[in-house]
């Protein structure tokens, strides 16, 4: 019998995600969207706006002169691999996807440009948005893409055992207190502004199911109860090492092992006995995320 060829690991697609933050009553709020239940990746989970890079995002010549800060400033703050192309293309994708998925434009313009952006948003909600809408906008109107508002937060890579993988840069953007946002009703079917604490509590209760990277990110943000504290942290925050979890499939559901787990670089042992009793409350340190009853939950080792 001829041996089957070895299954190759899929190459992660470059992608960008934006953590939209605005002031809240007691704590700052973030915008989360529910992915369509028909999605092929994290269906039904709440995530931050984002998506994969398009060909146009990577064409530097098209974006020259349309940013609000010099290239060297971008490289100093959000530079990727000392590459101008990577730095600009991921930033463009973050701006484009934030508008396409949430209706929030990370940029500035005169009155004519603002009217045009409103018209484009109407087309977005009618699912009639052209593929090159952003390029048409910056070419035809007095628009400046606000690269200065993008701040690096984290670099995630989807585990190797998943068929659909992404190499994703998570940016953070601080929005106005009255910032409105709305899902596109195609890839995302619901959207809400919520504090990290409330979102994590609702996830544990099964009300707002979070994707694993969203779950981890919200735990990271818990330590910043003050918006100014978060602003200060994000000003000089480096990308850091990629967060590449390991996926362990078990009879009781999949478990993600995060890079800071004590067994990450060894043969991982998972005790499935009384796993429910090891589910952690919101805010507890963790390194493992278990898919239990349709919800991703943090569990003790």
Image (cartoon, rainbow, N blue to C red):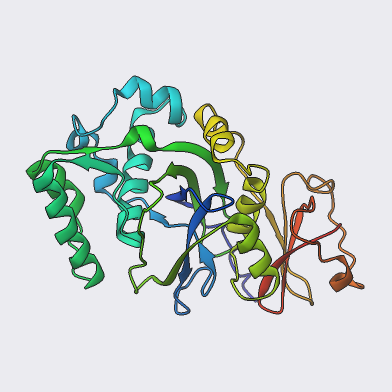
| Count of number-bearing discs | 0
State the image quarter where residue 49 is shown: bottom left
Between 31 and 70, the one nearer to me in the picture: 31
State the image quarter where residue 277 is shown: bottom right
Q: Quadrant of the C terminus?
A: bottom right
Q: Residue at x 44, y 49 (%)?
A: 18
Looking at the image, residue 269 sits to the left or right of residue 283; the answer is: right
Could you tell me residue 172's position as x and y percent?
47, 43
Could you tell me residue 206's position as x and y percent?
66, 76
Name of the residue lying farthest toward the front: 25
Q: Is residue 24 above or below residue 68?
A: below
Looking at the image, residue 165 sits to the left or right of residue 250; the answer is: left
Q: Residue at x 8, y 47 (%)?
A: 112
Q: Is residue 6 visible?
A: no
Could you tell me residue 179's position as x and y percent?
36, 53
State the image quarter where residue 125 is shown: bottom left
Between 75 and 266, the one nearer to me in the picture: 75
Could you tell me residue 41's position as x and y percent?
50, 68
Q: Is residue 44 visible?
A: yes
Q: Is residue 28 above or below residue 10?
A: above
Looking at the image, residue 53 sits to the left or right of residue 32; the answer is: left
Between 235 and 17, the one nearer to me in the picture: 235
Q: Residue at x 43, y 42 (%)?
A: 174
Q: Quadrant of the N terminus?
A: bottom right
Name of the residue lying farthest toward the top: 72
Q: Residue at x 11, y 45 (%)?
A: 111
């Amino acid at each position: 019998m001829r041996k089957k060829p070895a299954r190759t690991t899929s190459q992660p697609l470059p992608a960008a995600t934006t953590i939209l933050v605005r002031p809240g009553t007691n704590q700052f709020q973030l915008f989360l969207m529910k992915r369509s239940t028909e999605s092929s990746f994290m269906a039904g989970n709440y995530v931050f706006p984002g998506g994969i890079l398009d060909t146009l995002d990577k064409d530097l010549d098209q974006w020259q002169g349309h940013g609000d800060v010099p290239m060297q400033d971008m490289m100093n703050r959000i530079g990727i691999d000392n590459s101008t192309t990577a730095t600009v293309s991921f930033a463009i994708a973050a701006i484009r996807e934030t508008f396409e998925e949430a209706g929030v434009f990370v940029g500035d313009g005169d009155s004519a440009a603002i009217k045009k952006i409103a018209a484009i948003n109407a087309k977005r909600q009618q699912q009639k948005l052209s593929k090159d809408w952003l390029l048409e906008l910056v070419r035809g109107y007095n628009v400046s893409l606000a690269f200065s508002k993008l701040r690096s937060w984290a670099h995630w890579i989807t585990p190797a055992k998943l068929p659909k993988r992404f190499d994703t840069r998570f940016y953070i953007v601080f929005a106005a207190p009255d910032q409105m946002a709305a899902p596109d009703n195609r890839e995302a079917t619901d959207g809400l502004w919520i504090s990290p604490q409330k979102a994590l509590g609702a996830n544990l209760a099964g009300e707002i199911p979070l994707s694993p990277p969203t779950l981890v990110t919200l735990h990271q943000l818990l330590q910043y109860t003050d918006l100014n504290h978060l602003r200060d942290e994000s000003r000089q925050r480096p990308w850091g090492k990629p967060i590449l979890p390991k996926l362990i499939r078990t009879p009781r559901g999949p478990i993600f092992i995060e890079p800071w787990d004590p067994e990450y670089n060894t043969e991982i042992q998972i005790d499935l006995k009384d796993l429910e009793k090891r589910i952690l409350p919101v805010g507890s340190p963790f390194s493992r995320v278990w898919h239990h009853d349709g919800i991703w939950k943090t569990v003790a080792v």
